[in-house]
Image (tube, coloured by chain):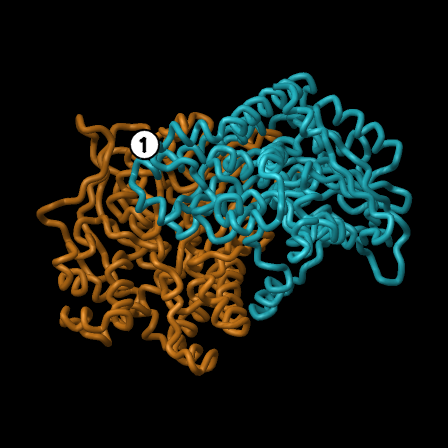
Chain colours: A orange, B cyan
Amino acid sequence: MADWVDLSIIDLESLKQRELEYRTELKQRILNVEQVAAERIPDKVPFFFTDYTGKKGCGCKIPRDTLNEFLKTANYNWKAGAKVSNDGSVGIGLDSAILPVRSVPNLRIVQSTDFFYPIVDDPEVMGMVTVSNVLSDLYATGTTQTDSMLMLLGVASKLTTEGDDVRTRIVGEFISGFKKGCDFANVGVHGGQTVECPWMLLGGVGTAVIPVESLSKLNEARANDVLLLTKPLGIRPIVNAHQWLHSDPERFKEHNLDEAQVRRAFLYACYNMARHNLIAARFLKEFNAHASTDVTGFGILGHADNLAKAQKGEVTFVIEKLPVLPYAQEISKSFEDRNGFKLFDGTAAETSGGLLIALEKEDAAKFIQKLKEFGIVGHIIGQVVKGDSNGNRAILLKENLQIFEETGVTDHFEEF
Amino acid sequence: MADWVDLSIIDLESLKQRELEYRTELKQRILNVEQVAAERIPDKVPFFFTDYTGKKGCGCKIPRDTLNEFLKTANYNWKAGAKVSNDGSVGIGLDSAILPVRSVPNLRIVQSTDFFYPIVDDPEVMGMVTVSNVLSDLYATGTTQTDSMLMLLGVASKLTTEGDDVRTRIVGEFISGFKKGCDFANVGVHGGQTVECPWMLLGGVGTAVIPVESLSKLNEARANDVLLLTKPLGIRPIVNAHQWLHSDPERFKEHNLDEAQVRRAFLYACYNMARHNLIAARFLKEFNAHASTDVTGFGILGHADNLAKAQKGEVTFVIEKLPVLPYAQEISKSFEDRNGFKLFDGTAAETSGGLLIALEKEDAAKFIQKLKEFGIVGHIIGQVVKGDSNGNRAILLKENLQIFEETGVTDHFEEF
């Protein structure tokens, strides 16, 4: 048998270059979405990918309690709540499945699948978001090199009725974005499944096979750790407000929002979703992360709670700050009738959000400094304290919760 | 690093026992479907799982040519047609993706995903069929031990409107069947994704990590080999006729078919689809298979053609016989207006069909004998001849094509 090939150390300069090229291409596409649409199908401008689904992004997810009911009925001996076994295996409940390779005891399969429906209107950007979202689960385990990607695709029946040309163009652009995301992550698309579906169904399966030693810690958070978050929050209110611009202009007007600001916020949201958590994953072990997860459908509080419950020690995760995307606060405040999309409760669904990491304060400072070199703004948003009689969990400060606008994303667009 | 664990040799007696238990449980469920439905939702008897989709089984698959158009538009450098690389890797096009593990050069990831919509009306049987169908791609490579299964589930919106009780019961039964299939294959369900979808979407992702030596040959078929098939054909005509019994009784009557025979044929079809190709996979290497694939959506001729094209040598696969399920011929003949569902052309879509194997004649005889010990009836259905100027391909005899009813399946039901 040949030697191990150590893939855990990716050359930092080439990674920086890759990241810069990817985000430059991403920004150009985001800024040119309307131009692209105009050249694509002249009689269908603007084009709304989100018109080809009844549910958007991670909002299609069946709630965990419902899933538990299904499993109970199936006499399936599993309940929600992630558990990390002594051998480092992780079952259903945390981000990725981590399991031993039966034929080689100290290897682990790290694997995750995600599929959902369009949440942004440009097919290529949506392809990039899809890959970023699928791989995010693997990044949360410290996996920086994925071996295989499968593409899951359901082509909307409605798109078929609009003619082969339109369908081929739209699906082709999605695949092109999917490919760009995989190229950035240095993973090939090795297969998948393509079917017809009433809604446009988009997803992937990421699989890595790595030595157990190269995984970062997942369940060793302890009191006095701080909580580091690597992307700002607020996808849901921004995407919804942007959607109403065309789907329900009357409703939009009632909220007295600034249309230009909403459009601008949406660009930042797309950018935020399509960027990978690869860089953060790369430094998890180097800066001694004790636990990490990625923030998606259950919101920052939901995922913090899930991660807290998986910890070995008795801990409570206290969230004290919410860094949010530009204009996300204004939008949320204007939707009092919908509870501000739950942004201020910490339960607003994110799509392809950042990593939430528990680690020592000094390590966090170094981690944030390192992320900055790659154009990523990390924030300490809370701390880990000793658990109480309520068991392991996460809480969000009610009074003194600090909400602030994260402008690191806007700075990137200033470069243009 | 610990030693290899050789998983390629499964103890035959325990395998025989597992197979017997699985098929006994399967038969009992199939024979009691109406009883189960009556006890489940008294005001909804009979229950038709196939009412929760617009497309059935593998019939939802986007044709390969269309997929190629998508990929072309995406500037994706791939075309249909399986290629086996020198290192044993297999890209998109054959049954499973086979690719090297980057960190351990002589390991291979064998992986396949499939998702589709209900093709049978009992959720539990459908769960068993789903797993059998997903793993079939891995079995075709000689993989007898899968390391990980992910479950892909889209819960039909219509089911949600019928109330939580109904939904939980139906989805629970599907998961129960899925679990039974995985138990038989000795693989755990390690995660997945569950979303809402207009159609009931069912699928899985199977992943195995195995030493390259334990894979069977895929591209070494040669002249004078024979072609062995391990399950009878005819799923599509039977499923369609059965469907019309309730969806379009008038149309059914016009065809002068025997209702009892159609119902009986449907039982055999369910049984056929839910049985795994594990036993056949187990003997691929032992009987020196030169190439193998599983028969699904493109029909026996389509998959034979695909496999022929992947061969190193210049070969033509000639199909001379079609073993079909009881009553499949009668149904097909009565549907002249629909070209007999293409059964006699060899292109009728199968779901979870058998393995098609190229090997030497003497080995085939031993293989068939061995399968018989496990209650599986294999048939030599054709031969491999030297290729001609048309390139590697498969053809179906036009004259002298022998079509015959395979009664091995019915024998199993006599045991009751």
Instruction: Name the image quarter holding residue A329.
Output: bottom left
Q: Of the residues shown, which amino acid type is indicated by label 1?
A: Gln
x, y percent for residue B181:
54, 31
User: Is residue A239 in view?
Assistant: yes
x, y percent for residue B124:
48, 33
Q: Chain of mark 1?
A: A
User: Is residue B97 in view?
Assistant: no
Q: Nearer the viewer, residue B383 or A253?
A: B383
**Picture residue at 14% right of the left edge, 70% below the top:** A254
> Dot 1: within a 10 Å radius of its alpha carbon, few (fewer than 14), some, or many (20 or more) residues?
many
Q: Nearer the viewer, residue B157 or A313?
A: B157
**Picture residue at 80% right of the left edge, 55% below the top:** B393
x, y percent for residue A273:
36, 59
**Considering the numbered disc 1 on the image, is that residue within a helix, a strand or a loop?**
loop
**Picture residue at 40% right of the left edge, 26% below the top:** A75
Q: Is residue A324 left or right of residue A187?
A: left
Q: Which residue is identified by label 1?
A: A311
Q: Nearer the viewer, residue A9 or B150?
A: B150
Q: Nearer the viewer, residue A28 or B352?
A: B352
x, y percent for residue B271:
60, 32
